[in-house]
Image: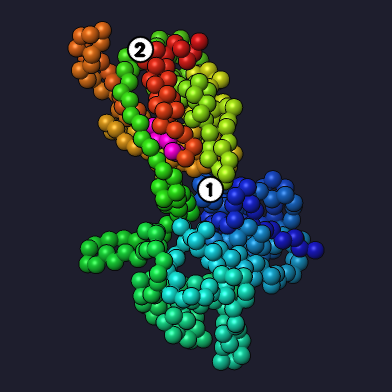
Amino acid sequence: MATELKMPALSPTMEEGTLAKWLVKEGDEVASGDLLAEIETDKATMEFEAVDEGTVLKILVEEGTDNVAVGTVIAMLGEEGESVDAPAAAPAKQEKKEEKAEAQPAQKGYGRDEAPKPEKKAVPAEAEGVKAPAAPRKDGERVKASPLARRLAEAQGIDLTNIKGSGPGGRIVRADLGDKAGGAAAAPQKAAAPTPQAQTVDPGDIPHSVEKLSNMRKTIARRLTEAKQQIPHIYLTVDIRLDKLLKLRSEMNAGLESRGIKLSVNDMLIKALGVALMEVPECNVSFGDGELIKYERADVSVAVSIPGGLITPIIVGANDKSLSKISTEMKELAERAKEGKLQPHEYQGGTASLSNMGMFGIKQFDAVINPPQAMIMAISAGEKRPYVIDDSLQIATVMSATGSFDHRAIDGADGARLMKVFKELVENPLGMVA
């Protein structure tokens, strides 16, 4: 009997993904452990392995398909020559998933093609979980349409029976309405303006190209919008002398050369932040719903730029790890991040973040907090500056570091203490390796 291959959940929070590429074709024989496909989640492209052996009888979801819900049947596996039809339930499951997501735009809608609701006193039936009346086709069949498409069609008086849907199973979605809906701005509304991701941009006659947003870019847009809208940021900046740290780095690299390890300034700053978080535990926290979570270990998420976006691999227990261990782990994590090979537990979590833009010559910047974390350290370029040392004006290598703190969870005085300890550790680096 044929076996259904379903869209896997590759992380605890994954609800849907993009079937980026099939690594097999119909008729191929596969064994347990063989790679079947590449699945794109919101942060990485991961490989989907076979757990059984057999012949690929039918591929039900074409590569490049977006928004494939977890649990959707994507292929059938069985014995060669076995006849099989696509399961009828598969499209319905995906449709149900999308309807649920669109029915609650206020909670989940930052990354979706969302439009303001028409002005109504009553809440639409779809948002209440009540099945909306079916719109019959001319032949008596029900019109399949998303709740958003139904609302816009109702507001603009559009007859859905005359529109061909491009969604799963011929389902009508917002994009199918096109200019008939008058655009998002045409729907009257009392609610706040739509988020930037939902707005339509008219480039006019300027030469341009259009790129479809990746799952990663959608997630970045949603999370950054949430962070700036919901987290009251407070920013604290200190100037830090780097001369002693640079000298210690040079000496340590000379001793580590035979082991093939080369410490970066960033490796040492990760260690400094980890130690500082343990010395000022009031900043190693997360703000929850009616509770404050206090962490007993400093897991530092490090911002890494990759093609198409940003990802934050985690140095677990940075406060206790040696500099050589941090350097080795960071190099390996960064390489796999750029290849899209990180596992979810390697970039989800962390207790605080560090973002370094010093290599670009940036003098100072304020980083956006990565929720549910409550702080992020922004590192700028080290440069030669006039600096008062022992009551005399000298030239020193100085960088600016700015901490962004969630003021709901961290008081300004505690944030200032963390910045003070971080500065002392970097200016006297033996204190973090002792």
Label 1 element class: strand
Q: Camera-side residue: 358 or 379?
A: 379
Q: Position of residue 96 (x, y in %)?
A: 62, 68
The correct choice, above or below, for 160 with respect to 82 in the image is below
Q: Which residue corresponds to the image point at 34% horizontal and 61% vertical from the top-left?
A: 210
Q: Is residue 41 left or right of residue 263?
A: right
Q: Which residue corresponds to the image point at 23% horizontal and 13% vertical from the top-left?
A: 388
- Judge the density around disc 2: few (<14), some (14-19), many (≥20) Cα neighbours within 10 Å: some
Which quadrant would the N terminus be assigned to in this image? bottom right
Q: Amino acid at mark 2?
A: Lys
Q: Is residue 211 left or right of residue 353?
A: left
Q: Does residue 65 show up?
A: no
Q: Position of residue 259 (x, y in %)?
A: 51, 15
Q: Camera-side residue: 353 or 288?
A: 288
Give the number of marks: 2
Q: Is residue 46 left or right of residue 418?
A: right
Q: Amino acid at mark 1?
A: Thr
Residue occupied by mark 2:
244
Magenta region: which residues? 402-407
Q: Camera-side residue: 402 or 190?
A: 190
Q: Nearer the viewer, mark 2 or mark 1?
A: 2
Q: Gap between marks 2 and 1, in whole Å?
A: 41 Å
Disc with the residue nearer the chain's start (2 vs 1): 1
- Judge the density around disc 1: few (<14), some (14-19), many (≥20) Cα neighbours within 10 Å: many
Where, by quadrant of the figure, is residue 267 drawn? top left
The correct choice, above or below, for 215 with respect to 277 in the image is below
Q: Is residue 146 magenta?
A: no
Q: Which residue corresponds to the image point at 70% horizontal and 62% vertical from the top-left?
A: 76
Q: Is residue 404 magenta?
A: yes
Residue occupied by mark 1:
45
Label 2 element class: helix
